[in-house]
Image: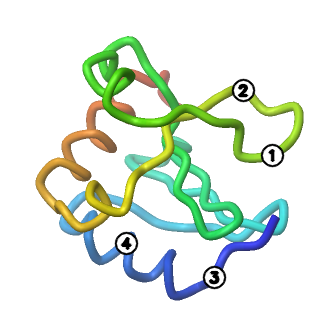
Amino acid sequence: MSAGQDLVDRLLIQLAPLHVRARAMFGGHCIYCDDKVVALVCDEQVFVKPAASTSEWHGRLESASPYPGAKPCLVASDTLLQDRRRLRALVQATADALPKPK
């Protein structure tokens, strides 16, 4: 897995003003929103964790594993990555559905 810093930087810009940050790990990057891991950036793709509150997105986005053995995630399409409003809505809904970190 590898993730270009350019993609991560563009993603963080698109997600502003949400409380987001990225951290390099596993050869890719984890994207945090409200201190919760909401997405992974691997192999130049953005994988958003699925959640019950994001079920409306499940039929519209492809599902794939970010790396072998990982649970399937929603793959953010290029169109979604360019639509700030929809992208922020998906990431915030995912963060809201996840438990608070310990």
In the picture shown, does residue 17 fall above or below 10? above
Q: Which residue is mark 1?
A: 67
Q: Quadrant of residue 55?
A: top left
Q: Quadrant of the C terminus?
A: top right
Where is residue 74 shown, x and y percent of the image?
A: 49, 36
Where is residue 50 shown, x and y percent of the image?
A: 48, 26
Q: Which residue is mark 3?
A: 4
Query: Tag 1: residue type?
Result: Tyr
Q: Is residue 93 left or right of residue 37?
A: left
Which callout, 1 or 4, points at the residue further toward the start of the chain? 4
Which callout, 1 or 3, points at the residue further toward the start of the chain? 3
Query: Tag 3: residue type?
Result: Gly
Query: Tag 2: residue type?
Result: Lys
Mark 2 and mark 1: Cα distance apart in space: 9 Å
Q: Which residue is mark 4?
A: 12
Where is residue 29 shown, x and y percent of the image?
A: 66, 65
Q: Quadrant of the N terminus?
A: bottom right
The secondary element bearing badge 2 is classed as: loop
Mark 1 and mark 3: Cα distance apart in space: 16 Å
Q: Which residue is mark 2?
A: 71
Residue lying furthest top? 52
